């Protein structure tokens, strides 16, 4: 194992979840990188809605927290040690970590759809891999992406949610001149606004019930916003070519689909976790394409380019910052503060 000149401790602090709303700062062993792996000192890690679900309920979809789990899957950091057989990354490089490591051998991986790998090891998923609410974490060298100097540590961490937006835009085939509707102005909706504009969408309309987030959507490139607490989408007079459904709010999805133009594309991005009714007659008679998204694949280079070139501003999304000792506050700030958009944990503070 190769490492830098700084002493790597034997133990580190980590925010460990033991059950619903039971999160403790524990002293745990620093992991040692195996073949192809890197040890990364974590500089920033974003909080995600899935982290909040795990924290509040102890479960998310098919996964249940049945033992100690370190949350956090949106990390950036600096490489401090490398394992055997590492050839493409070196100690001292600042990296954004793609939090899923697929098997690379199954049919999905060989077709390039590694996000659908059934043997995926994903950060902060029970039974798969520890997360990054910690001072150090392991990453596979194939999924640690070098960050250019002009990209901040916090923006590097948020390349993960940005990748969700890039994947959604790619699935929707957004092209110059398209008109896009984005439902939901949470972090995924807000990055999707910027990606849609970067991909050439001429009009981007965003809907939500939070006036502050709608104002931020306008600042980030939305051409129009609709507060659906006051104005139904059907009254907005907008017929998009593309719908990116980022709210995950099942009752709102059918109305949004009914606004889409003939031969339009609908991408379900937000994870509602349950069933929903769909306007099947509308989908058929308008020949709408409808698909879902699951994480992302091969998106980091595009995401990095968008941020490094200034086409996407991720730092603008960060509204709250917490040291590792206050990771629990980072997970709950959204319920306490209406101005919260994205909370970031800074483990080295």
Image (cartoon, helix red, strand yellow):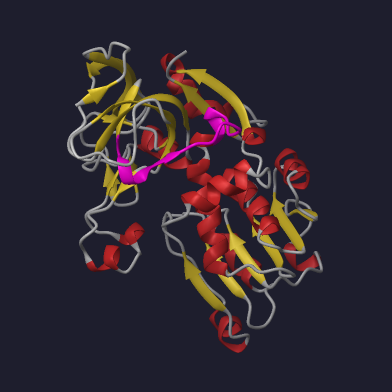
Q: Is residue 299 rendered to the left or right of residue 321? A: left
- What residue occupies the far bottom of the structure in this picture? 285
Would you place residue 237 above or below residue 285 in this image? above
Give the extent of the magenta segment: 139-155
Residue 85 at least partly seen: yes
Q: Is residue 154 magenta?
A: yes
Q: Quadrant of the N terminus?
A: top left
Count of numbered circles on the image: 0
Q: Position of residue 341 (x, y in %)?
A: 61, 35
Q: Nearer the viewer, residue 106 or 57?
A: 106
Q: Position of residue 58 (x, y in %)?
A: 32, 37
Would you place residue 8 above or below residue 50 in this image? above
Would you place residue 199 above or below residue 330 in this image? below
Residue 269 at least partly seen: no
Q: Nearer the viewer, residue 87 or 345?
A: 87
Q: Position of residue 290 (x, y in %)?
A: 52, 74
Q: Is residue 280 magenta?
A: no
Q: Position of residue 254 (x, y in %)?
A: 59, 69
């Amino acid at each position: 194992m190769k490492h830098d000149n700084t002493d790597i401790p034997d133990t580190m602090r980590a925010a460990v979840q033991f059950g619903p709303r039971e999160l403790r700062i524990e002293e745990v062993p620093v992991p040692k990188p195996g073949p192809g792996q890197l040890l990364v000192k974590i500089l920033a890690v974003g909080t995600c809605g899935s982290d909040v679900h795990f924290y509040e309920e102890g479960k998310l979809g098919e996964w249940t927290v049945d033992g100690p789990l370190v949350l956090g899957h949106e990390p950036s950091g600096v490489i401090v040690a490398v394992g055997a057989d590492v050839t493409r990354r070196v100690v001292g490089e600042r990296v954004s970590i793609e939090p899923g490591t697929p098997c690379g051998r199954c049919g999905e991986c060989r077709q390039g759809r590694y996000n659908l790998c059934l043997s995926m090891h994903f950060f902060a998923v029970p039974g798969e891999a520890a997360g990054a609410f910690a001072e150090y974490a392991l990453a596979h060298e194939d999924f640690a992406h070098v960050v250019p100097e002009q990209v901040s540590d916090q923006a590097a961490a948020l390349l993960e949610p940005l990748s969700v937006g890039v994947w959604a835009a790619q699935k929707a085939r957004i092209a110059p001149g398209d008109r896009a509707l984005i439902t939901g102005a949470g972090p995924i909706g807000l990055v999707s606004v910027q990606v849609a504009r970067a991909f050439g969408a001429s009009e981007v309309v965003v809907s939500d019930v939070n006036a502050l987030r709608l104002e931020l959507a306008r600042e980030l490139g939305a051409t129009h916003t609709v507060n659906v607490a006051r104005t139904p989408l059907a009254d907005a007079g907008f017929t998009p070519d593309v719908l990116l459904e980022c709210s995950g709010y099942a009752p709102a999805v059918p109305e949004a689909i009914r606004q889409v133009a003939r031969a339009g594309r609908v991408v379900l991005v937000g994870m509602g976790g349950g069933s929903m009714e769909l306007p099947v007659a509308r989908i058929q008679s308008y020949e709408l394409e409808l698909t879902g998204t699951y994480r992302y694949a091969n998106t980091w280079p595009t995401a990095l380019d968008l941020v490094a070139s200034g086409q996407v501003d991720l730092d603008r999304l960060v509204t709250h910052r917490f040291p590792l000792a206050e990771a629990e506050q980072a997970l709950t700030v959204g319920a306490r503060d209406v101005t919260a958009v994205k909370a970031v944990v800074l483990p080295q503070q």
